[in-house]
Image (cartoon, helix red, strand yellow):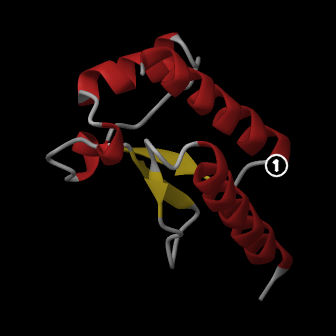
């Protein structure tokens, strides 16, 4: 496995562990098998999709790709790019956590 794949795999593990530790009541995440883009589900939160996507942009300052753009008809997911420097992953997850704390 080349260094880039190892790095991205480590980022996915970090994302998964962070969500399990800090956001498990509202979010879930399964590490994808063949891409650097992961999907974070907020179905467990019970929150309206439009509210979540708007809050992620307005409160979290995060540009999101809603699931409805990619055949998630219930729109209970947003896409997260793991091919980023770790500090950006950490910052993004903190912004997601703060967003969900404010809208719950």
- Quarter holding the C terminus is top left
Direction top: furthest residue:
58
Q: Secondary structure at mark 1?
A: helix
Does residue 47 appear to the left or right of 17 in the view shown?
Answer: left
On screen, 62 above or below 40? Answer: above
| Vertical arrangement, residue 13 with respect to residue 47, above or below | below
Tell me which residue sits at (55%, 43%) in the image: 23
Residue 5: x percent and y percent? 73, 75
| Residue 45: percent from left, percent from top | 35, 38
- Structural crowding at the residue carrying mark 1, measured as other residues with C-alpha within 10 Å and reported as few (<14), some (14–19) or many (≥20): some
Is 69 displayed left or right of 1 in the figure? left
Total numbered circles: 1
Residue 55: x and y, percent? Answer: 43, 17
Is residue 49 left or right of 12 when viewed as pictured? left
As drawn, 82 above or below 10: above
Extreme residue in the left direction: 73
At 56% from the left and 25% from the top, the residue drawn is 62
Q: Nearer the viewer, residue 76 or 27?
A: 27
Q: Position of residue 84 (x, y in %)?
A: 73, 49
| Any part of residue 57 in sight | yes
The residue indicated by pointer 1 is: 86
Res 14 quadrant in image = bottom right
Which quarter of the picture shows residue 4? Answer: bottom right
On the question of residue 82 being in view, the answer is no
Q: Is residue 27 left or right of residue 84?
A: left
Residue in the picture at 31% in, 19% down: 51
Q: Where the N terminus falls, by quadrant?
A: bottom right
| Residue positioned most to the bottom | 1
Rendered image quadrant of residue 22: top right
């Amino acid at each position: 496995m080349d260094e880039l794949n190892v790095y991205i795999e480590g980022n996915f593990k970090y994302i998964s562990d962070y969500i399990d530790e800090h956001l498990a009541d509202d979010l879930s995440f399964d590490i994808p098998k063949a891409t650097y883009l992961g999907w974070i589900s907020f179905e467990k939160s019970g929150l309206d999709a439009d509210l979540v996507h708007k809050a992620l942009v307005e409160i979290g300052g995060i540009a999101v790709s809603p699931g409805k753009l990619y055949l998630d008809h219930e729109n209970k997911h947003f896409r997260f790019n793991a091919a980023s420097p770790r500090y950006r992953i950490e910052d993004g997850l903190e912004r997601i956590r703060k967003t969900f704390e404010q809208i719950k």
